[in-house]
Amino acid sequence: MAPTATYPNLRRTILAALALAALGLLAFAGVASADLATPESGGSSNADDIDTLYKFVLVLAIIIFIAVEGVLVYSLIKYRNRKGAVAAQIHGNTKLEIGWTVGAAVLLVVLGGVTFAFLGDIRNPPNSSANGYNGPGTEPVKFASAEDRQPPNGRALRIQVNGQQYLWRYTYADGDDNRLNNVFAYTEMVVPTDTTVTLAIKAQDVIHSWWIPQLGGKFDAVPGHTNYTWFKIPGDKAGQVFRGQCAELCGRNHANMVATVRAVTPDQYKLWLAGKKRAIETGNKAVIAQRKALFPTEEDQVTEDSAVNPTP
């Protein structure tokens, strides 16, 4: 009878141990514990401001929580039920009620003021640094909408981010009337450091969500609509890779829709861009030659624009 009596306790102990082990694995996983209780930051000033604002609100919330719960615990202990005691009948305290109403209003004003103080730097991109990239694609552009914010001098590297099941496509502006040229890449975005990068984010099938936590907040990629954001990676982050993932459930392979941003120096970016152009030109010529061999009568319909780089 003894083993039967202790079996439920043993089962509960095993289940509790497994639950604690699972929580431990989650807590100490690299991704799960990134910045632990606060947003990731360090890749761009807007992400740093989001992190700072979050920490300010978190500290204030912890102080209020401890104060409220402290009063609650104190009241539970001091005024706990005692033998022969009679509960006091309290009909209100006007001064106390005015005090916590004014206190709550002051907290809201403080939170609102601090939020608006950070909001401008989070939303509005700064100028690129003097030693940043200043080549094709950074010419001043016209505002596409009120949300399409540009640096004060209007110069930024514009990249179009297109979400499609289940990958990201990045198309780089060529600086010619701000049209998008044939330079494009999938999954990994390569950007120069010390350079303001503005993103025009859209989708071609379902709703996706672009989010690289260390580079700022997440933005939805919506078919038929364009969202805009920006980041600027400091020069000392050259060589670093920032990782993210689609943050909107977009289908059965949503988990595989990862994104990376690789930061390089402006000189390395120029070499990468030139290499990409040569690779695309070579691919275009090969496809055109093959197309001509297979369909000689359609020779005049084949262009380098439609060979390798179809419109996203």
Image (spheres, rainbow, N blue to C red):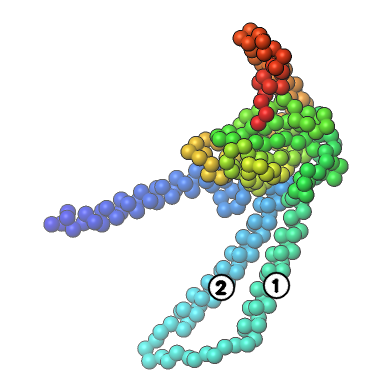
Residue sitting at the far right:
153
User: Residue 203 location, x and y as percent?
Assistant: 63, 39
**Residue in the image at 56% along x and 45% along y:** 248
Taking the image as shown, residue 186 lies to the left or right of residue 118, namely left
* Quadrant location of the N terminus in the rendered image: bottom left
Say few, some or many: other residues with alpha carbon within 10 Å of mark 2 (under 14 / 14 to 19 / 20 or more): few
| Element carrying mark 2 | helix
Task: Name the amino acid, label 1.
Answer: Val
User: Residue 125 location, x and y as percent?
Assistant: 78, 45
Question: Residue 101 is drawn in which quadrant?
Answer: bottom right
- Could you say which is closer to the camera, residue 160 or residue 145? 145
Eye-nearest disc, 2 or 1: 1
**Residue in the image at 66% along x and 16% along y:** 283
On the question of residue 268 being in view, the answer is no
User: Residue 109 location, x and y as percent?
Assistant: 72, 69
Residue under numbered circle 2 = 68
Residue under numbered circle 1 = 106
- On screen, residue 144 above or below 86: above
- Could you say which is closer to the camera, residue 206 or residue 116? 206
User: Residue 271 location, x and y as percent?
Assistant: 75, 22
Taking the image as shown, residue 110 lies to the left or right of residue 211, namely right
- Could you say which is closer to the camera, residue 193 or residue 223? 223
